[in-house]
Image: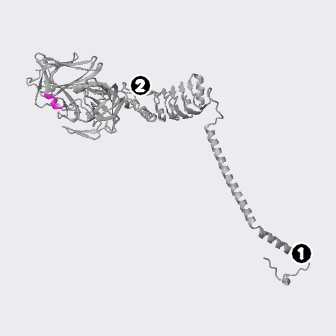
C-alpha cells in the first residue's frame, strides 16, 4: 500500500504509473498543498501536517494488514505557508518503537527526506506515529508499506520479530544518479529500495567503473537485489590503494552491514588476482576476500554481512588490498538494529480510549498510538510501569487534574486493574461515581474533589483496603458515607467528604436520620404501593355502594303517590270486611269482588 497524505482521491504518478491511495479516515491532522523537498520525493501535490494544538502524538492506524515482513517508508514534505516552519523536526515511530528523529538540514540531503525500516507486522494493523518535539509541525508527504520476503536481511540468531532494521545508508558505488528498485527494473519483493549514488569516497582516492555485461546470482531470494546494482563499482587507485568510506551514526548502537561485490574489472581474469581485507572501525571483519573465488566466477554477485557495535559517532568501512594493488566495491547497506518496544496491555489501552471518549479529553493531550511507547513520548496524564513477567507495560497512575474535563467517569475505568493513583480533581466531571472503582484492588489514592459528582458514595469503595487518601470534597454527593470508609479513618487514612451538602454519617458531617437498608427501602416502597392500591379499591367500592343507595332512593321517590293510593284502598276493603263479617255470604250469592 502507498498512501498520498492529504489526498482526497487516489492518484497515479509518472513515469511508473504508481498508484497512491487517498488517506481519508486514516488519521487527524490537516491536509495542505505540498512543497517537495527533493527531486527524489514522489511527485505528489498534497501532504498532511499535525499542529501542536491537535496533540503531540498523531498516528496513521492502518487496518487489515496481512501478517508479514514489510518495508515501511515515510517521506516528509514541506508546507509553503509563510506561518509554518519550513523545516520541521520531529520523531517517527512504527508499532510503538521510535525509529528516527529528523535532524536540522534534512531538506538539503536526499537520503534524509524519508525514513525507512524493515518491520514485522503481526496484529493485523500498521501504526505509524509522528511526535512533535517543539520544532515545527510534523508534515508527511507519503507512506509506503511494501511486503518483502519473510527472511529478508536475516543477519543471524538475533534477527527476528523483536527486531526492526532502520535503513541508515544505502549506496550504489560508482553510480551518478539516485535510483529506486523500480528504476532498476528490480523485483518488487525487494521492497522498491532507494539507492543513493556515490561517485567517489574521496577526491582522487578511487575511480568509477561499470559494465554492460549481465550479472549472475543477483536477484535471488530473500533480498532480491537488482542486477544493475552490480554493474557499477568503485576501484581504488595506485596513489590510494585502500578504499575507505565513513558515515555518521548514532553512538552506542548495533549496526548490520551488507557489502556487495561483483568482479566487473576486465583486468581481473581469475581468482587470486584481487584479494583484500575488510575492516570496520579498524577491526578486521573479513579476511582475504577474493570476489571471483567466493562468488564462483567473474560477473557474479557476492554479498557479505556482519554486525558490529559502534560506540562512537562514526562508522568507517575500509578495504585493504592484499593481492593486487586495488580493492573494489559495488554497493553498501547499513542498518541500525532497533529492539522493538514492548507494548501496553491491550485491555488497558482500550480502557484508556474509553476514558478519553467519556471524559471528552481535549485534542491537545494527543492520546493516540500506544500510551507508554515509545518511551520518549508517553501519553500526558498516564503513568506507566513495566511488568517483566508479562513483558508488557501497564498504567499505574492517572493525573488529569485541573484540565477542564466535563464528561463522566465510565465503568471501564475498572479495567485499569493496576492503578494505584487516580487524580481527576478540579474539573467539571458529572454523574455518579462508578461502583466498579471498588474492584481496583491496589488503589492507594483517589482524588475526585471539586467536580460535579452526584448520587451516593458506592459501598464498593469500602472494599479498597489499600486506600490511604480519598478526596470527595466539593461535589454534590448525598446519603450516608459507607461504614467501612468511616472505620478506615481510625487506621490513619486521610479522607475528605466536606462541601457535599447531602452527606452524613461520620464525625464532621451531619447525623443521618433513620437509615434503611436497600431491602428495607424496597419493602417500604412495596408496602406503600399496596396500601395505595387498597385505598383505590375501597374508594371504588364505597362509590359503587353510594350510587346504589342513591338510585334506590330515587326509585322510591318516584313510586310514592301510587303507594299511598294503594294503601287507602286496602284500608277501605278491610273495613268493609269487618262490617259485613256478621252477614257474610258466599261468593255465589254476592258475585265476584273486582279489585283493580
Does residue 70 show up? no
Classify 432 as above or below 104: below
Between circles 2 and 1, the one closer to the viewer is 1
Q: Is residue 468 left or right of residue 313?
A: right
Q: Which mark is residue 386?
A: 2
Main secondary-structure element of the magenta-colored stretch: helix
Q: Quadrant of residue 118?
A: top left
Classify 582 as above or below 85: below
Classify 279 as above or below 147: above
Q: Is residue 594 left or right of residue 130?
A: right
Residue 571: image x %, image y %? 85, 72
Does residue 542 show up? yes
Q: Is the image coloured rainbow, by chain, by secondary structure, or in one colour?
A: one colour
Viewer-closest of 428 and 383: 428
Q: Quadrant of the C terminus?
A: bottom right
Viewer-closest of 340 and 199: 199
Instruction: Work out which residue is located at the far bottom of the displayed protein and give it.
Output: 589
Viewer-closest of 292 and 51: 51
Residue 288: image x %, image y %? 16, 19
Instruction: Work out which residue is located at the far right of the displayed protein and give it.
Output: 582
Pick whichever of labels 2 and 1 is earlier in the sequence: 2
Disc 2 to disc 1, C-alpha distance? 125 Å
Are there few (<14), some (14-19), or many (20+) residues within 10 Å of tag 2? some
Q: Which residues are magenta?
A: 225-231
* Residues tagged 2 and 1 counted as in contact (Cβ below 8 A): no
Q: Quadrant of residue 106?
A: top left
Report the label total: 2
Q: Label 2's element?
A: strand
Q: Which residue is mark 1?
A: 578
Residue drawn at the location 80% of the way across and 79% of the way down:
594
Residue 153: image x %, image y %? 25, 28
Amino acid at each position: 500500500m502507498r498512501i498520498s497524505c492529504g489526498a482526497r482521491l487516489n492518484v497515479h504518478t509518472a513515469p511508473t504509473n504508481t498508484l497512491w491511495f487517498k488517506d481519508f479516515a486514516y488519521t487527524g491532522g490537516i491536509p495542505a498543498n505540498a512543497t517537495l523537498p527533493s527531486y527524489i520525493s514522489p511527485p505528489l501535490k498534497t501532504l498532511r501536517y499535525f499542529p501542536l494544538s491537535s496533540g503531540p502524538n498523531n498516528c496513521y492506524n492502518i487496518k487489515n494488514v496481512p501478517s508479514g515482513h514489510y518495508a515501511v517508508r515515510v517521506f516528509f514534505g514541506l508546507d509553503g505557508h509563510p506561518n509554518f516552519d519550513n523545516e520541521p523536526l520531529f520523531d517517527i515511530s512504527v508499532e510503538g518503537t521510535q525509529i528516527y528523529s529528523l535532524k536540522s538540514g534534512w531538506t538539503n540531503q536526499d537520503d534524509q527526506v524519508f525514513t525507512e525500516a524493515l518491520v514485522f507486522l503481526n496484529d493485523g494493523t500498521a501504526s505509524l506515529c509522528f511526535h512533535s518535539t517543539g520544532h515545527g509541525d510534523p508534515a508527511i508527504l507519503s507512506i509506503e508499506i511494501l511486503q518483502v520476503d519473510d527472511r529478508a536481511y536475516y543477519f543471524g540468531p538475533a534477527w527476528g520479530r523483536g527486531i526492526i532494521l532502520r535503513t541508515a545508508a544505502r549506496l550504489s558505488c560508482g553510480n551518478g544518479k539516485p535510483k529506486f528498485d523500480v528504476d532498476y527494473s528490480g523485483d518488487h519483493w525487494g521492497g522498491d529500495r532507494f539507492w543513493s549514488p556515490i561517485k567517489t569516497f574521496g577526491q582522487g582516492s578511487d575511480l568509477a567503473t561499470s559494465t554492460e555485461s549481465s550479472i549472475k546470482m543477483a536477484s535471488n531470494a530473500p533480498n532480491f537485489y537488482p542486477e544493475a546494482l552490480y554493474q557499477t563499482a568503485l576501484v581504488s587507485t595506485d596513489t590510494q590503494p585502500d578504499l575507505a568510506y565513513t558515515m555518521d551514526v548514532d553512538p552506542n548502537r548495533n549496526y548490520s552491514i551488507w557489502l556487495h561485490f561483483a568482479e566487473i574489472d576486465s583486468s581481473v581474469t581469475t581468482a587470486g588476482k584481487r584479494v583484500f581485507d575488510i575492516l570496520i572501525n579498524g577491526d578486521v571483519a573479513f579476511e582475504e576476500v577474493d570476489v571471483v573465488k567466493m562468488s564462483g566466477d567473474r560477473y557474479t554477485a557476492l554479498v557479505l554481512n556482519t554486525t558490529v557495535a559502534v560506540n562512537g559517532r562514526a562508522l568507517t568501512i575500509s578495504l585493504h588490498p592484499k593481492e593486487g594493488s586495488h580493492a573494489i566495491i559495488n554497493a553498501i547497506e547499513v542498518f541500525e538494529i532497533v529492539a522493538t518496544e514492548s507494548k501496553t496491555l491491550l485491555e488497558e489501552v482500550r480502557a484508556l480510549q474509553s476514558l478519553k471518549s467519556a471524559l471528552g479529553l481535549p485534542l491537545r493531550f494527543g492520546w493516540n498510538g500506544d500510551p507508554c511507547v515509545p518511551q520518549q513520548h508517553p501519553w500526558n496524564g498516564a503513568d506507566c510501569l513495566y511488568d517483566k513477567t508479562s513483558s508488557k507495560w501497564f498504567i499505574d497512575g492517572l493525573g488529569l487534574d485541573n484540565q477542564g474535563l466535563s464528561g463522566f467517569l465510565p465503568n471501564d475505568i475498572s479495567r485499569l486493574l493496576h492503578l494505584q493513583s487516580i487524580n481527576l480533581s478540579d474539573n467539571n466531571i458529572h454523574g455518579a461515581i462508578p461502583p466498579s472503582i471498588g474492584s481496583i484492588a491496589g488503589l492507594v489514592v483517589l482524588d475526585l474533589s471539586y467536580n460535579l459528582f452526584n448520587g451516593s458514595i458506592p459501598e464498593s469503595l469500602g472494599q479498597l483496603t489499600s486506600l490511604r487518601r480519598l478526596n470527595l470534597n466539593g461535589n454534590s454527593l448525598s446519603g450516608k458515607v459507607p461504614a467501612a470508609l468511616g472505620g478506615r479513618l481510625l487506621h490513619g487514612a486521610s479522607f475528605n467528604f466536606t462541601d457535599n451538602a447531602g452527606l452524613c454519617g461520620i464525625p464532621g458531617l451531619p447525623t443521618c436520620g433513620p437509615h434503611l437498608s436497600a431491602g428495607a427501602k424496597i419493602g417500604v416502597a412495596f408496602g406503600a404501593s399496596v396500601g395505595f392500591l387498597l385505598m383505590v379499591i375501597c374508594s371504588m367500592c364505597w362509590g359503587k355502594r353510594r350510587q346504589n343507595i342513591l338510585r334506590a332512593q330515587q326509585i322510591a321517590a318516584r313510586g310514592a303517590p301510587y303507594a299511598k293510593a294503594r294503601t287507602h284502598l286496602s284500608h277501605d276493603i278491610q273495613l268493609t270486611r269487618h262490617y259485613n263479617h256478621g252477614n257474610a255470604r258466599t261468593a255465589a250469592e254476592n258475585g265476584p269482588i273486582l279489585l283493580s
